[in-house]
Amino acid sequence: MGMFRGMNDADPAGTRNPYFLEGKYVVRIVSCTTIASRLNVPFFIVESEIMESTNEELPVGVTVSTLYNLQKDMGLPNVKRFIGVANGLTDPEEIKEQVTEEVAELTVSEEQPLTGVILRVNARKHVTKKGDEIVVVDWMPYEN
């Protein structure tokens, strides 16, 4: 596969997945990819299917997208933590040592090694230094 990977599932209407809203979720990872915006800004994207939800607006079965701007200060640290947690790591030092550039490249490769991984999500509101309100996504291991 090449640059058209995912074409078979593409929606010609151009619809986009919603983003997480405030709430607690259990999700299954669908895919991890990267894109460059029209302004050539690199993004890491996690698509996940909701299995449990405390937010009525995002019920079970909905696929949501989480985007990380890799040019922002917290872009790479947030992606590193996500990849670590999705690989079963919880200790920050282990994540720091084991989640390398090579692991990140594998994560977005055609192999899609994180597809099917189940995680917990806590999506919470946060006010930035600029005063903007955003939803922060905290990824956590899923424990039955």
Image (cartoon, rainbow, N blue to C red):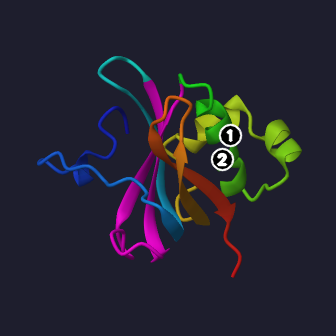
What amino acid is found at the position of numbered circle 1 in the picture? Lys
Q: Residue 47, how many percent across, how many down?
A: 43, 53
Which region is colored magenta? Answer: 42-70
Q: Determine whether, in the image, residue 92 is placed left or right of residue 58.
A: right
Q: Determine whether, in the image, residue 14 is placed left or right of residue 61.
A: left
Neighbourhood count class around disc 1 (C-alpha, 10 Å): few under 14, some 14–19, many 20 upward? many
Tell me the quadrant of the picture where the C terminus can be found.
bottom right
Q: Of helix, strand and loop, which one carries label 2? A: helix
Q: In this figure, which residue is indicated by the disc labeled 1?
A: 80
- Residue 37: quarter of image: top left
Q: Which residue is drawn at 50% across and 67% down?
A: 23
What amino acid is found at the position of numbered circle 2 in the picture? Ile
Q: Is residue 112 visible?
A: no
Q: In this figure, which residue is indicated by the disc labeled 2?
A: 83
CA–CA distance in space, label 1 to label 2 = 5 Å
Q: Residue 117, how many percent across, how many down?
A: 59, 64
| Magenta stretch holds residue 63 | yes
